[in-house]
Image: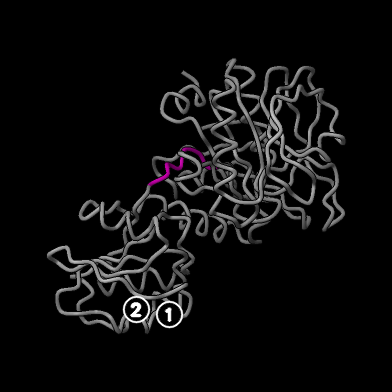
Amino acid sequence: MSFLEEVTKKYQTMSIIGMSKNSGKTVTLNHILSMADEDGIPVGITSIGRDGERMDIVTETEKPTIYLTRGSLVATTTELLKLSDAVVEILEMTSYETPLGSVLLGRVKYDGYIQISGPQTLAETKVVLDKMIAYGAKLAILDGAIDRKTSAAPEITQCAVLAAGASVHRSMTEVVKKTAYVASLFSLPVIDIYRDKIGDLLDRDSYGIISQEGEVREIPLQTSLNAGGKIAAEFKEDSKIVVLSGALTTKTLVDLVQATDRLQDMIFVVKDATKIFVSQRELKRCQRKGLNLAIFHKSELVLVTVNPYATQGYRFEPFQFKESMENALKGIPVEDVMMGESS
């Protein structure tokens, strides 16, 4: 059974995220589309940003284009559809407006190149992905924006593919290290106690502390940014779980850890791995002090792709790069999409 057949047995939605700009995200998308075509798996695609254009409007460099075959589903905008070569039958016009026109859903009638851009909010994106599945896609794919891990949030997509490339850093060792760290966040433990109370706080984008007996005390905050001291001021002897909506940053975590001597008795919970923006160094330091960090939702990282070529003009030795990544990512498939070889 092929990789994609295995994936679609478990999941209906997938996100593709990049470690950095030019890390091979669009090449990864095209590779997955090619596998889907070969396996006869109907797919749908959309994007959290814009993709498929021949030239990067920021760097003025060439970009990989996106090619869709007959039967594929797509969510894009009216203006970008005019720039596409593929002939698309419009199935539905949505009410979602963007600077690139209204978002529409369509089915490819004749193969061709296409540009994609979806809704501007994650909630609308989730609706669009679900609609493509309703129209017959066995796998709906979200092309994530650069450094926007939130496009891989579990409430949006069920599994994720991470694209890592030489453009991340000139040192191969650093690229592997950074990628392994991001991958490790997807494997954080899932909180298994007081889930109904934690879920209620997260659904309302609220912050709170749950005692050992399950008593909930909400903290009046709009954001956790630079609010570590305010949250820590709410700690009590019976505090067990600290629920953090929104992003967890390095400064917030450090302030929280420094404010308690009962670190091993408490669990800090975020919605999912995409909400963690803490440096690897600081996270490891806090974990050595006894930090228990958990997630509420889990998204499966099903594949890491590597691109040994950097747009800055240097390259890594392809086989060494892939092997080093495999050694660092035990249990996660690694594929060099520039060479077409999979592990």
- Magenta-colored span: 298-304
Contact (Cβ within 8 Å) of mark 2 with mark 1: yes
Q: How many marks?
A: 2
Say which residue appears at 73% left-offset and 21% top-offset. Answer: 69
Quick one: label 1, few (<14), some, or many (20+) residues within 10 Å? some
Label 1 secondary element:
loop
Residue 4 on image: x %, y %: 52, 25
Give the residue at mark 1: 227
Amino acid type, label 1: Ala
* 327 lies left or right of 53: left
Q: Is residue 257 above or below residue 154?
A: below
Towards the viewer: 170 or 85: 85
Residue 268 on image: x %, y %: 30, 66
Amino acid type, label 2: Ile
Q: Is residue 299 magenta?
A: yes
Residue 87 on image: x %, y %: 82, 22
The outermost residue toward the top is 40
- Gap in angstroms between the C-alphas marked 2 and 1: 6 Å
Quick one: label 2, few (<14), some, or many (20+) residues within 10 Å? many
Tell me which secondary structure the magenta stretch mostly adopts: strand
* 79 lies left or right of 18: right
Residue 278 on image: x %, y %: 46, 68
Classify residue 245 by image quadrant. Answer: bottom left
Q: Is residue 49 magenta?
A: no
* 273 lies left or right of 296: right
